[in-house]
Image (spheres, rainbow, N blue to C red):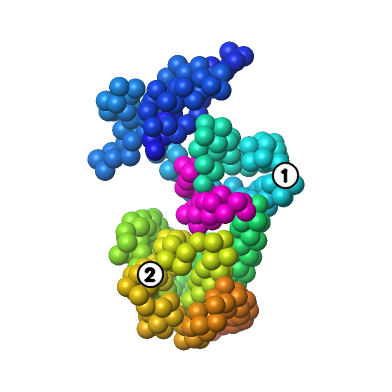
């Protein structure tokens, strides 16, 4: 169904704007008129392969102006900063479930939630969702209009809750799921944050030594005129290159990061990156276990919400945090459509640990697939904790040894000329 953007006046004469779903512009105007909203301007958004266009009331395409194109680009840029809104979405979902459970209708519950939202991006999105609901759009379709905040998993679970009449229970389960995913992500981030801080601080210390300390000391040493030891010569070469060509190194880093980002945004590039990540020693095992735990949590949650297994796998392929696993899940879904079970293609994939395929097979045979998936998730949650501790325990000594070697080399290169007879 087309989505129309409109500008209008309400009953009090105040200007308002928003979006509404309708089959035609005329139907959209009638819906708004029934809500005592008087339209002054309306356009239908059309997503085309050749660019962004709008259609006027007569259906003719209208090219967007520069300001409107800039607005669209700005919205894409703002999508990178939705982290806080997604974090607050957990509490919003739980509160919405509680209000619906208490017997408050959906629009009333959304109104109450909107009054308590703190994030400046989440509030306007929920207001647009409420406007769409008032216009007769389903809750799931209203959420689907904001994909940067509500992913396919969220939308499809809400759709299943609406279809089954148990929206409050589905939202509660969804809030629990989002909270569990947040905890797991925080555990992995905490395991990797400390080593990264050590690396940055170590680089800062070395940069300070090369930029300020070493030049002053070496200047005094070189005034003696004697031949310098090899380590000192190497240090002087490195220090000169660092001071004279730091901008080139910064440029290389920026360009490399830009090329990496461009390549990994393509399907093949993302697949290559995620395949390589899973093959990394220690860290790859951590990310694999995290992906398996997320897969099991998500699959169990979707099945409990009443979504069919093939639809679950389609959603999982889009929301899983590793493209290689997503590709495997797409192949699993194709095999299921052809008539096989879930466990057989998972066992043959070589990506999932064998125990996952065995547990899923037991769940299929016993009719308790959701329970078995939850057990897998719980087991791998613990494995993620253990693996993150191992990664931290492994990386920290390596970083300390590496930094000690670098600083030790600098000290050796400075002290050697003094030991050979140089005096201040």
Q: Which residue is mark 1?
A: 103
Badge 2 local density, few (<14 within 10 Å), some, or many (20+)? many
- Indicate the quadrant containing the C terminus: top left, top right, bottom left or bottom right: bottom right
Would residue 113 appear left or right of 308 to someone viewing this image?
Answer: right
In this rendering, does residue 234 appear at all? no
Q: Main secondary structure of the magenta part?
A: helix
Residue at coordinates 40% horizontally, 22% vertically from top-left?
26
Give the magenta-colored segment's residue range. Answer: 141-167
Q: Position of residue 105 (x, y in %)?
A: 67, 40
The circle drawn on residue 333 is: 2
Residue at (51%, 83%) from the top-left corner?
365
Secondary structure of the residue carrying tag 1 is loop
Magenta segment includes 322: no
Which of labels 1 and 2 is toward the front? 1
Which quarter of the figure has residue 71? top left
Cβ–Cβ under 8 Å for marks 1 and 2: no
Residue 339 location in percent, x, y?
35, 75
Q: Is residue 91 left or right of residue 260?
A: right
Residue 58 in picture, x, y percent from top left: 30, 22
164 is within the stretch colored magenta: yes
Q: Quadrant of residue 386?
A: bottom right
Q: Nearer the viewer, residue 261 or 268?
A: 268
Secondary structure at numbered mark 2? helix
């Amino acid at each position: 169904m087309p989505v129309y953007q409109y500008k209008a006046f309400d009953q009090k004469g105040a200007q308002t704007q928003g979006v509404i779903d309708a089959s035609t512009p005329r139907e959209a105007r009638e819906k708004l008129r029934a809500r005592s909203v008087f339209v002054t301007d309306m356009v239908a958004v059309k997503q085309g392969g050749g660019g962004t266009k709008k259609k006027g009331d007569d259906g003719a395409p209208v090219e967007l102006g520069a300001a409107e194109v800039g607005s669209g680009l700005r919205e894409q840029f703002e999508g990178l900063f939705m982290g806080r809104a997604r974090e607050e979405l957990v509490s919003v979902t739980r509160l919405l479930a509680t209000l619906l459970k208490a017997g408050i209708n959906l629009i009333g519950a959304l109104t109450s939630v909107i009054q308590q939202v703190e994030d400046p991006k989440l509030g306007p999105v929920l207001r647009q969702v409420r406007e769409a609901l008032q216009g007769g759009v389903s809750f799931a379709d209203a959420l689907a209009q904001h994909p940067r905040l509500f992913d396919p998993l969220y939308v499809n679970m809400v759709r299943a809750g609406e279809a089954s009449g148990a929206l409050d229970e589905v939202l509660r389960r969804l809030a629990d799921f989002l909270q569990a995913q947040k905890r797991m992500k925080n555990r992995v981030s905490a395991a990797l944050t400390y080593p990264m801080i050590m690396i940055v601080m170590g680089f800062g210390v070395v940069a300070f030594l090369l930029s300020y300390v070493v030049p002053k000391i070496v200047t005094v040493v070189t005034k003696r005129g004697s031949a310098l030891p090899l380590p000192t010569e190497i240090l002087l070469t490195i220090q000169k290159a660092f001071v004279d060509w730091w901008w080139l190194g910064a440029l290389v880093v920026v360009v490399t990061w830009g090329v990496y980002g461009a390549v990994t945004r393509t399907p093949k590039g993302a697949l290559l990156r995620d395949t390589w990540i899973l093959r990394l020693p220690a860290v790859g095992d951590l990310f694999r276990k995290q992906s398996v735990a997320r897969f099991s949590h998500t699959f169990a949650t979707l099945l409990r919400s009443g979504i069919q297994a093939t639809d679950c796998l389609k959603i999982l392929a889009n929301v899983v945090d590793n493209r290689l696993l997503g590709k495997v899940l797409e192949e699993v879904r194709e095999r299921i459509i052809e008539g096989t079970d879930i466990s057989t293609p998972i066992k043959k994939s070589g990506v999932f640990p064998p125990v996952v395929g065995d547990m899923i097979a037991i769940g299929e045979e016993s009719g308790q697939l959701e329970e078995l998936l939850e057990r897998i998730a719980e087991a791998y949650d613990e494995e993620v904790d253990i693996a993150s501790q191992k990664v931290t325990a492994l990386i920290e000594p390596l970083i300390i040894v590496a930094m000690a070697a670098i600083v030790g080399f600098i000290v050796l290169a400075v002290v050697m000329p003094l030991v050979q007879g140089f005096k201040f």
